[in-house]
């Protein structure tokens, strides 16, 4: 919580150093081939008797069935999903026995955060298992769980903000000061986050850099959120809703990029304060043009000065394309139908974990650092229709495929390798993305598009 005693406040140097070590703690020297955690999100879409979408299922219904009521019923009969819990001031969640959990986004999107698995194959199998149980439960109520980057069937204004506990109301109010993109991101998008380990000294620095350099190509390759003038509207939302806390750390872009802790520490200071947590359960929205550095130097007329705890909370509100949290949270991924989910997961794990692939990828993308913001914007607008992005993507994912084959047998799994080859042939090499299949199917029959997104 903030303090009204400026002598008790955190200093600029302390904040910069603390943020850097929070993101990149002292490495585990034995960890070269790391684990995999996934966070896929899904839209609960109600369908009619013909399978056509007819609206989003709301999070809860006081007199009927909502998203939570379905999971409540499943938890009573399925030992893989534990009963609902609430940890004030946070929202509800359903723990999973293996250490994962089910949570929900402000538009009622269902999120499955897996435990950390020792390989790609097991992480993907975990998602498939949990989603199979959930999909069956929702199907009893004519609801599909659609894995696409944006809800193309409903207007965002028809889906209210449904999480009001804790920080969510303050977060929504903060974004409203900046325009409409915050509402789109919170209530109308779904992602596939990939969590990978940092690795030992000398390796974690390379993984951090490569994850950032590859991020625009992830956006371009796996775009699945069409909208006006964009193939990846979800990325457009992140580009516009608050540039102080999204995209890429300024010092990484400007180079030389040899101190990730300094890059992240400075990015944290330059990001505007989104939320003031003034007590355990009282959150106030931040204001524009008041970054954390300014808060340290000038204080706030009502809340005083920030402490180390305020910095730690501020770090949870940063949403750069790669977020270091003692591991690397890759945030560029779109929610994808089941048949393609393995592709970005296996490719990014191979690029970061296989030494030869990582070296080749870094060599390929070495000249892209200062172009990252431009490449990211072009990726959201045109994806691999952009000739330069398509060429880079084909070359990068070719390296990734060879790296996946070089990993220990069973780490990725044969099905994932086949999916990569099929995906690159069907989409990337042809300058296409899932966005294109989604639009084509929806134009033919929305029921076909919903079925594609839900299976």
Image (cartoon, rainbow, N blue to C red):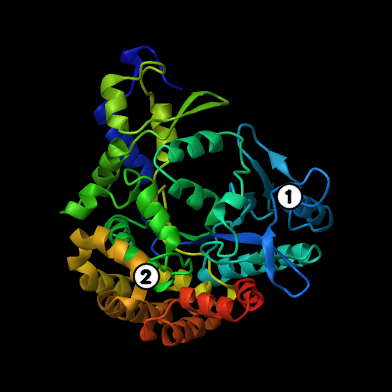
Q: Alpha-carbon distance for marks 1 and 2? A: 34 Å
Quadrant of the rendered image containing residue 400:
bottom left
Nearer to me, 368 or 233:
233
Quick one: label 1 or label 2, which is nearer the N terminus? 1
Secondary structure category for the residue under label 1: helix
Nearer to me, 197 or 385:
385
Task: Name which residue lies at 66% across and 64% down.
Answer: 145
Q: Is residue 86 left or right of residue 209?
A: right
Q: Is 398 located above or below residue 45 in the figure?
A: below
The image quadrant where one finds the C terminus is bottom right
- Residue 182 is situated, as x and y percent measured from the top left of the image, at 46, 46
Q: Is residue 376 left or right of residue 342?
A: left
Q: Is 211 located above or below residue 167 in the figure?
A: below
Q: Is residue 118 left or right of residue 164?
A: left
Q: How many marks?
A: 2
Which disc is residue 220 wearing?
A: 2
- Residue 239 is situated, as x and y percent measured from the top left of the image, at 35, 53
- Residue 377 is situated, as x and y percent measured from the top left of the image, at 31, 61
In this orientation, does residue 424 appear?
yes
Q: Residue furthest top?
A: 5
Task: Name which residue lies at 51% across and 82% down.
Answer: 419
Q: Are marks 1 and 2 in contact (CB under 8 Å)?
A: no
Q: Is 12 located above or below residue 420 in the figure?
A: above
Secondary structure category for the residue under label 2: helix
User: Which residue in the structure is indicated by mark 1?
Assistant: 68
In this orientation, does residue 410 appear?
no
Nearer to me, 15 or 32:
15
Task: Name which residue lies at 69% across and 51% down.
Answer: 58
């Amino acid at each position: 919580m903030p303090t009204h005693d400026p002598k008790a406040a955190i200093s600029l140097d302390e904040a910069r150093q603390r943020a850097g070590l929070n993101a990149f703690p002292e490495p585990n020297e034995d960890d070269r081939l790391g684990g995999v955690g996934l966070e896929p999100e899904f839209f609960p879409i109600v369908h009619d008797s013909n399978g056509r979408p007819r609206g989003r299922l709301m999070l809860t219904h006081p007199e009927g069935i909502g998203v939570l009521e379905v999971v409540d019923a499943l938890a009573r009969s399925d030992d893989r999903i534990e009963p609902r819990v609430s940890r004030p001031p946070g929202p509800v969640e359903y723990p999973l026995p293996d250490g994962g959990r089910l949570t929900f986004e402000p538009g009622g999107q269902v999120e499955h955060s897996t435990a950390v698995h020792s390989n790609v194959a097991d992480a993907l199998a975990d998602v498939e298992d949990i989603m199979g149980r959930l999909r069956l439960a929702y199907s009893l109520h004519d609801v599909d769980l659609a894995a696409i980057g944006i809800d193309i069937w409903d207007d965002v204004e028809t889906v209210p903000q449904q999480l009001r506990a804790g920080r969510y109301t303050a977060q929504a109010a903060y974004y409203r000061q900046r325009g409409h993109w915050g509402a789109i991101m919170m209530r109308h998008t779904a992602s596939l986050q990939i969590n990978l380990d940092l690795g030992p000294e000398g390796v974690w620095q390379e993984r951090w850099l490569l994850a950032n350099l590859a991020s625009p190509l992830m956006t371009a390759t796996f775009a699945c959120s069409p909208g006006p003038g964009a193939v990846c509207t979800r990325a457009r939302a992140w580009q516009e809703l608050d540039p102080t806390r999204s995209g890429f750390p300024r010092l990484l872009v400007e180079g030389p990029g040899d101190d990730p802790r300094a890059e992240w520490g400075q990015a944290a200071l330059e990001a505007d304060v989104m939320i003031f947590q003034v007590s355990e359960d009282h959150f106030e929205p931040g204001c524009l043009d008041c970054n954390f550095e300014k808060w340290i130097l000038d204080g706030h007329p009502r809340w005083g000065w920030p402490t180390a705890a305020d910095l730690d909370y501020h770090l949870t509100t940063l949403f750069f394309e790669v977020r270091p949290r003692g591991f690397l949270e890759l945030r560029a991924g779109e929610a994808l139908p089941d048949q393609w989910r393995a592709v970005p997961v296996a490719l990014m794990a191979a690029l970061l974990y296989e030494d030869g692939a990582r070296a080749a990828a870094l060599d390929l993308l070495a000249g892209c650092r200062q172009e990252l913001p431009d490449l990211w914007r072009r990726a959201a607008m045109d994806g691999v229709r952009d000739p330069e992005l398509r060429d880079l993507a084909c070359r990068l994912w070719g390296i990734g495929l060879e790296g996946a084959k070089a990993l220990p047998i069973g780490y990725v799994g044969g099905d994932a390798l086949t999916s990569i080859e099929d995906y690159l042939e069907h989409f990337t090499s042809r300058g296409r993305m899932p966005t294109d299949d989604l639009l084509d199917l929806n134009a033919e029959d929305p029921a076909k598009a919903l079925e594609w997104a839900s299976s």
